[in-house]
Amino acid sequence: MTFEAVTTFLRKIAPLMSLTKKELELLSTPKKVLQSELDVNGKKYSAYHVQFNDARGPFKGGIRYHPDVDLDEVTSLAFWMALKTAVADIPFGGGKGGVTVNPKELSSHEIEGLSRQFVRAFHEHLGPTKDIPAPDVYTTPQIMAWMLDEFEKITGEHAPGMITGKPLELGGSLVRDIATALGGVYVLEEAIKKIGLEEKTVAVQGFGNAGMNMAKLLFEKGFKILAVSDSQGGIFDSNGLDITELIRVKKETGSVVNYSGTKITNKELLVTGCSILIPSALSGVITTENASAVKAKIILELANGPTTSSADDILHKNNVLVLPDILSNSGGVTVSYFEWIQNMYGYYWDEETVKKRLKEKMVTAFSGIWNMYSQNEHDFRTNTYIVAIRKILTAEKLRGMV
Ligand code: GLU
């Protein structure tokens, strides 16, 4: 989503919160924008690192490798990270990194070179109490390991808390691999209880880390997964898909479309007859063109920015509960926070402890926003933004910035 669209939404809710001009400006301006050109075998790749806001703690957010990455997108994503850490109530700010590259076209050795260069370009601005990156679209625990190694080579000391989403052997946390999806499950379960949803049929767009784990966790809990998709297309079965089998097919053939079932397009998946829709891929997929055709009662946004602002208004009018990205996918950064705590203490938690603490965080965040939502006429996203913005501005006020 463009940063212009992001700030338009901010301006829309500013009167509801009586934001001053100065506050609005502070919220719409990144603190630092860093850019570099990375070189792999003579080929150049643009790299960005945006530090949006650190009033509540060190900048935090993932690094994305994708051909569509540009400064505008990284800025929007960095802004959302600042809101996300506030909603999750963890002591971090928001930042984001990105490289304009299709990693599928690079060898593992080239990806390693690119990742080490990223750290060499921005290392002065990174560190466990400054700015803590993590995985995002197409970046993996192995990439985090290379980045950590490069950082430690430069600084000459061990600093596992400079990056999260690492492999367990280098100080990663249990549950971090499924945390985005699991956090989403906890939010969804609470929302289902609140609105008394009985039919539990699901469509999941995207079969990367978030989408695949979401489909798997819900399948194991007995939800009927009617449709899933990846970048090559989707698959539908009114009797429910066998997600264990689907994961095998995806791993073996590279796409869910090779599973036996009715083929559908990504567009069709969004308007499929189901009670829960989970966009887990890219941004801007639910728009004014398809919003009124959405049949789901709940949209759980696991992707960042899948719904446009005008689509939101249509969905709200049609009584569709949209659980926004900055809440629904905050399980990832929440377990990143747990990983960072464990690194700083050098003391590691068991799986049960991580899951219990993640659930506490997600349920508390959801319940606080639900209480507000049930007492006013604004949609759930607006209420979520109000909670996040209040927290950021309180910290800025205490620092004397506004
Ligand atoms: N990239 C993830 C996100 O957008 C995780 C960020 C993190 O763990 O810092 O929330």
Image (tube, rainbow, N blue to C red):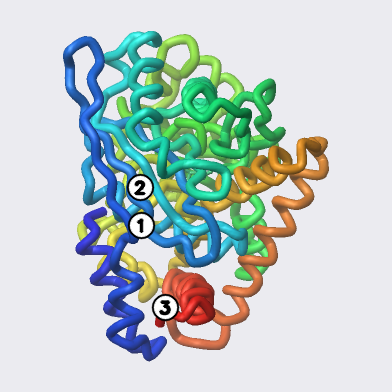
Q: Is residue 224 above or below residue 25?
A: above
Q: Comparing marks 1 and 3, which lies closer to the viewer?
A: 3
Residue underneath mark 3: 401
Residue at x 62% of width, y 24% of height: 167
User: Is disc 1 in contact with disc 2, using a CB cutoff of under 8 Å?
Assistant: yes
Residue at x 69% of width, y 34% of height: 173
Q: Is residue 262 above or below residue 321?
A: above
| Label 2 within 8 A of ligand 1 by Cβ | no
Which of 316/370 is in front? 370
Q: Position of residue 92 (x, y in %)?
A: 55, 57
Q: Comparing marks 2 and 3, which lies closer to the viewer?
A: 3
Amino acid type of the residue that numbered disc 3 sits on in the rendered structure: Met
Amino acid type of the residue that numbered disc 1 sits on in the rendered structure: Val
Residue underneath mark 1: 294
Query: Is residue 95 rendered to the left or right of residue 327?
Result: left
Residue at x 41% of width, y 51% of height: 95
Number of marks in picture: 3
Q: Quadrant of residue 219?
A: top right
Q: Position of residue 383 (x, y in %)?
A: 48, 76
Residue underneath mark 2: 270
Query: Is residue 130 rendered to the left or right of residue 182?
Result: left
